[in-house]
């Protein structure tokens, strides 16, 4: 349940009018990367394929949240 709340918070941040365009672009890139069939490491490689998705998306979201906090 906590993870869903986080995702919901990130979605609200993405669609707020006062969110800087850089934050929106980074969150959008994280979503596109997560949904894209093109990966740095293919998903069929046992464990590592999903691990790179998780790592890259986590880093992008963390960076976007850091930028959003600087704005406040």
Image (tube, rainbow, N blue to C red):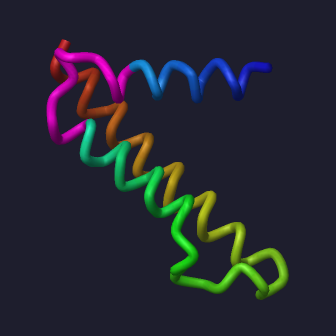
- Going by the image, does 27 lie left or right of 43? left
- Going by the image, does 48 lie left or right of 30? right
Relative to 52, does residue 42 appear above or below in the rendering?
Answer: below
Q: Residue at x 44, y 42 (%)?
A: 61
Relative to 32, does residue 64 appear above or below in the rendering?
Answer: above
Task: Verify whether residue 37 appears in magenta.
Answer: no
Q: Which residue is drawn at 73% across and 78% down?
A: 48
Report the magenta residues as a range: 13-23
Which quadrant: the N terminus? Answer: top right
Residue 49 x/y as whole percent: 70, 77
- Going by the image, does 45 lie left or right of 38? right
Residue 44 x/y as whole percent: 78, 85
18 or 59, which is in the foreground? Answer: 18
Most extreme residue toward the top is 72
Which quadrant: the C terminus? Answer: top left
How many numbered marks have been drawn onto this rendered protein structure?
0
Q: Which residue is drawn at 33% across and 24% down?
A: 15
Quarter residue 55 falls in: bottom right
Residue 45 x/y as whole percent: 77, 87
Most extreme residue toward the right is 46
Relative to 55, does residue 9 appear above or below in the rendering?
Answer: above
Residue 65 x/y as whole percent: 36, 31
């Amino acid at each position: 349940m906590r993870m869903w709340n986080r995702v919901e918070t990130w979605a609200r941040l993405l669609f707020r009018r006062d969110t800087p365009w850089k934050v929106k672009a980074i969150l959008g890139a994280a979503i596109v990367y997560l949904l894209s069939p093109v990966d740095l490491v293919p998903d069929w490689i046992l464990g590592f394929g999903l691990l790179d998705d998780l790592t890259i998306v986590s880093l992008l979201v963390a960076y976007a949240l850091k930028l959003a906090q600087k704005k406040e």
